[in-house]
Image (spheres, coloured by chain):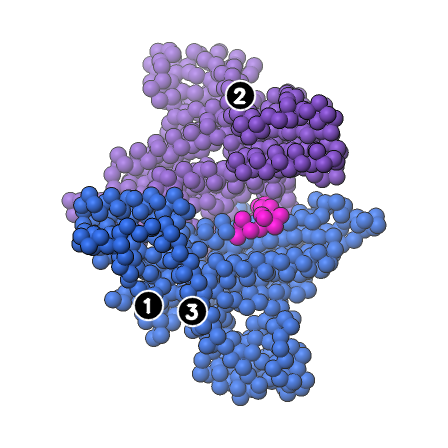
Chain colours: A blue, B purple
Amino acid sequence: MKNKAITSRDKDFAQWYTDVVKAAKLADYTSVKGCIAIEPNGYAIWEKIQSIMDKKFKELGHVNVQMPLLIPEHLFNQEKELIEGFAPELIWVTEAGEKKMEERLAIRSTSETLFCDYYKKHITSYKDLPKLYNQWCNVFRYEKETRPFLRSREFLWQEGHTVHATAEEAEAETKQMMEVYKWFNHEILAIPSITGKKTEKEKFAGAEYTITNEDLMYNGVCLQDGTSHYFGQKFSKAYDVKFTNKDNKDEYAYYTTWGKTTRAIAAIIMVHADDYGLVLPPRIAPKQVVIIPIGDTDEVNNLVNKFNQELNSNDITTYIDNTDKSPGFKFAEAEVNGIPIRIEVGKRDLENNQITIARRDTREKITISKDINIVDYIKELLETIQNDMYKKATERRDALTFEAHNMEDMKKILNTQPGFIHAMWCGDSECEVKIKEIKGCKSRCIVEDGERIDDKCVCCGKEAKHHVIWGIQY
Amino acid sequence: MKNKAITSRDKDFAQWYTDVVKAAKLADYTSVKGCIAIEPNGYAIWEKIQSIMDKKFKELGHVNVQMPLLIPEHLFNQEKELIEGFAPELIWVTEAGEKKMEERLAIRSTSETLFCDYYKKHITSYKDLPKLYNQWCNVFRYEKETRPFLRSREFLWQEGHTVHATAEEAEAETKQMMEVYKWFNHEILAIPSITGKKTEKEKFAGAEYTITNEDLMYNGVCLQDGTSHYFGQKFSKAYDVKFTNKDNKDEYAYYTTWGKTTRAIAAIIMVHADDYGLVLPPRIAPKQVVIIPIGDTDEVNNLVNKFNQELNSNDITTYIDNTDKSPGFKFAEAEVNGIPIRIEVGKRDLENNQITIARRDTREKITISKDINIVDYIKELLETIQNDMYKKATERRDALTFEAHNMEDMKKILNTQPGFIHAMWCGDSECEVKIKEIKGCKSRCIVEDGERIDDKCVCCGKEAKHHVIWGIQY
């Protein structure tokens, strides 16, 4: 039975998204305009994202720090491109107690300024390098239109800021961290993202270049979900981050930053959820299995407790729903919350020595012997679900991947069904501007070592330089 | 050899504290006035604090959420005592982009307003209760004088906000969470804190009552380190948080909040550190053991790697310092950073089949056989260090615990050596004001079921009501 609180995904995607966020109790609007309250179900997903990514960062030698929330205006102004890029989105603290402050302080929208200011003081020699710092924090951008997780004025993220003694090392870091984001999306979130460089027009304000991780939503709209920036010496010159190199000469340091946000939760929803609510890939699900007893007998309760104990002690996050709600209500709740597997232990089933197992992703129900080795069975099923979800998302992505050879193709695709659109490009930003006129379509990324699918630019017909993926974005 | 970068603790305690923070690379000042950068060594301690406390909170049924950073002015104004208590410390966002905002937004100094506003929308029936929410976040208070960790304009904390259907349940929660803080200080931080109710004058703005966790620093100054507040129905009336009770009648909900901050790091330093730098109790040390190879032979390296592998695989956080610094430099660094145990594996020692183990707390060096069962030995030694540190801190606390029976006693103690001062009190806030005139001495807490050590108030001589602990505070 379809969840009545949820609009059909194929009927109204935007409303469906909002309904799922609300029905799965992930987040809610607040009295603070453009800012959400991340509710327990939503925050538990973020905690899981944090724990998996943080472990990987640390394995790669990164350490966590915490810089201030506020940035004095003079510091922001030191890097021209940065302030120009972010000025319209900044909000300013101007009063303390009941007094006007001497200098305005911006709430961080990103922390390059503060990290560079810190590094300036703390780096003197190549022996101090590399510095591989990361922070988990909240940032603020004054967005006009907001949607929970997708685009909030305040959001949570991690921002890595690393400094290196050579360009090679810094570029390797930029690439490595993008590989981490890609690994995370593919292996953990079951999202077949693509990666590549941003064009000059779309790169981060002040960076030499930006590599991006791009997801395709169920409706064919693209979502930028993790970026890694190489700054070369640009910021270290603006903020005077110097070190003495091995030849005993002063040199400006090489700088990278990389970030991923709570937007990943929006991606999970818009790639995997359905008309019944959230669907969580097992590796990111805070709770992987729910056990629901039906009928209050000793046999039922003993088996429920046995399963729960066995699964939890084998690293499968399991809970028993023994509230006094009806079984039907419990099924619906587990479903809308996206719990990957539901085990129903019923009095009647047990008369036939059976239990029922329901997969959230396919909504398939399986009746099996109650004497099965539950740990092995569930472990394997969780793997199967993870792989099937990845496969399904890849099929959807591929079905919404198109090729354009001229502007007619572009228009036709964008007016019929948006998606990832492969097309060759001359490298001229004028062509980007023209393509954007069609429904706001933007370059997503330049495909690295991409096959030349045409000799001419999709827009101007001149000689093509790059194989680019285009699309409409959130 | 004393660390030259560190002023003697007995000579200048304030300078010593700042020196330790800097030498152990816990935090540094920034270009943002009153705000610090928490450096890797400091943040790793906070991560450890978070992980241990968070696990305990969850075991007790709490879940994490995230409310907005900003609070619209009208929301703050709904609770009179709260706004009066916090107004001088608030900072205000007034501009977005380059435009003036319609309403000022305060950066949260505490989040009662936002939680109540959320609960108002989300609680309708007693079936929705209790709500046991907590959040880990940054908060901002516009302090005049700041010191790293001790009093920063911005700091990190957790704030629990729970709502209950009965006063009994809410009061039990207030008490339970204070027991958690006390357990944490005693068992994990090796700090023998004391707990009790705050007086009316010292309680949280708007609370019915506040229970506090108070530590005594090495210099006899008190530090409030964790508070738990019972609000009764006061805030739920101000913010209209109602529910339908079991008798189907509308009732205002019962509310509690409780919080502990990065100030705990200041307490660790000021209770345990010494003239050689930081001293970390093993249970909170991010790294418990460092192994230092002396001499680059196969025998040295093999044993170092063997120890490292065995200790880490037995949940003892261990690392090898194989940088190219000198052994002496490595010893000093491990010492200033407070690593509880240092294992020295030296070429010469090995000729006698020996290794050396150094305790950070006592700075004792022990020479033992290289064939010892290293895991058992280190496990036991970590326990011993933890217990000895607690014992030493308790002895210091007890040595600085005094009894006053009149104002002469009070003055004498406070002018000689401050500490925890036990004295009876009539309950009149006028007496508190008079006592405060002596070096700013304040009531720390009312001792629950405290022995009556006198019949008369220490100040006015009238009949005593409460056994109170007094002291000078940070």
Residue type, mark 2 in image: Asp
Disc tally is 3
Q: Secondary structure at mark 3?
A: helix
* Disc 3: host chain: A
Picture coordinates of residue B166, whole percent (x, y):
25, 39
Q: Is residue A136 above or below residue B312?
A: below
Instruction: Please name the residue shown 61% across and 21% down the image.
Output: B362
Instruction: Please name the residue shown 38% across and 52% down the image.
Output: A376
* Disc 1: host chain: A
- Mark 2–mark 3 CB contact (< 8 Å): no
Residue type, mark 3 in image: Lys
In three-dimensional space, the C-alpha distance between marks 3 and 1, rounded to whole angstroms, equals 16 Å
Instruction: Please name the residue shown 74% across and 55% down the image.
Output: A166
Q: Which residues are magenta?
A: A53-70
Does any portion of residue B149 appear in the rendered image? no
Q: Have a look at marks 2 and 3 and say if they share a chain.
A: no
Q: Answer with left or right where residue A23 lies relative to residue B408.
A: left
Alpha-carbon neighbours of circle 1 within 10 Å: few (<14), some, or many (≥20)?
Answer: many
* Disc 2: host chain: B
Which tag is nearer the camera, tag 2 or tag 3?
Answer: 3
Q: Write down the residue under mark 3.
A: A392
- Mark 3–mark 1 CB contact (< 8 Å): no
Q: Residue furthest left?
A: B247
Q: Have a look at marks 2 and 1 and say if they share a chain.
A: no
Q: Answer with left or right where residue A152 lies relative to residue B311.
A: left
Residue type, mark 1 in image: Asp
Give residue B388's mark.
2
Give residue A275's mark.
1
Sequence-first disc among 3 and 1? 1
In three-dimensional space, the C-alpha distance between marks 2 and 3, rounded to whole angstroms, equals 58 Å
In three-dimensional space, the C-alpha distance between marks 2 and 1, rounded to whole angstroms, equals 60 Å
Q: Is residue B473 above or below residue B263?
A: above
